[in-house]
Structures are given as C-alpha cells and as structure tokens.
Amino acid sequence: MERSRTARRLRGLVLPVALTALSACSRNQPATDVASGDPTVLEFNNESLEQADVFVRAQGSDTRRIGTVLAGRREELVVPREIAIRGSITVFARLLAKSGVPSSGPVAVAPGSRISVRLPIDERTLVVLPGQS
C-alpha cells in the first residue's frame, strides 16, 4: 500500500517536472521577424582621401560588392538579404589606387538591422559600431 501511494505521487510529479525541464531548455530567440522585408543597412563613412569600393562576405558565400563611397562621403548601402540571413558578415573596402584592403572582421547582423562602418583617414582598418535607428 505504501508502495502504490509513492508510485502515484511520483507519476503526478513526472509531468510537471518534464514540462519545466523542456521549457527551460528551449531557445530564447529575439523578437525580430525574419520574414519581414526590412533591409540590412550598412552606413559607410569614408573619412579617407580615397574612393572606396565596399564589399561584404558571409562565411561560405562569395564576396559581393554593395557600393562605392567617394572620399569624405557617407552612404547607406544595403546588404543583400541572402548574405544578411547568414548571421555574420565581414566588410571589406578596396581603395582606389591602393594595394591594401582594410576589413572589419566578423560582424553579427540580422535582416532589418543597421550597422555603421567607418574608414578612418589612416586607411588601416574598418571600425564597426551599432547603427543609429
């Protein structure tokens, strides 16, 4: 009799414990709507004295040219959706009449996000900051 009461009590606890464990293990994803048509915008600020052709590449994909930014100008460039949905991109700038190619390193992005990239006057690297809304 004692044994059956313990078994019933255990069966009554198994379901709540299992549901709690499953909900604790679920992935919490941000409230972004991946299906939305919002473009990923890269605001490129060219502080150098050279024209910059801007390229992006996601891991496992080809490099894609997204625009040209003249010296001393700021432009909003759109990252192609098929690259943005990969989650991480690297931004490159090919400078007119220069052999160096400054890059940003991997940057986390999502469809609809904005990032700000700055090419300083020394032309050595690209500086990435979260974009302004």
Image (cartoon, helix red, strand yellow):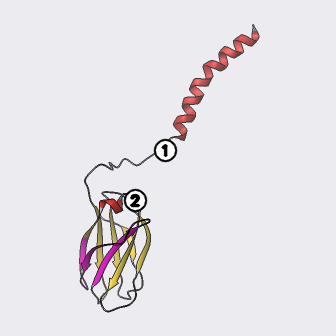
Q: Which residue appears at 70% of the width and 11% of the height?
A: 5
Q: Which residue appears at 25% of the width and 79% of the height?
A: 68
The single residue placed furthest to the top in the displayed view is 1
Tell me which amino acid carries mark 1: Arg
Quadrant of res 60: bottom left
Residue 114, position as x, y percentages in the image: 31, 63
The single residue placed furthest to the right in the displayed view is 2
Q: Quadrant of the C terminus?
A: bottom left
Quadrant of res 10: top right
Residue beneath disc 1: 27
Magenta residues, as a range?
52-76
Residue 15, position as x, y percentages in the image: 57, 24
Give me the disc on residue 36: none
14 relative to 113, above or below: above
- Identify the element where label 1 is drawn: loop
Which tag, 2 or 1, sits closer to the chain's start? 1
- Identify the element where label 2 is drawn: loop
Residue beneath disc 2: 86
Query: Mark 2 near mark 1, Cβ–Cβ under 8 Å?
Result: no
Q: Which residue appears at 35% of the width and 80% of the height?
A: 93
46 relative to 26, above or below: below
Tell me which amino acid carries mark 2: Arg
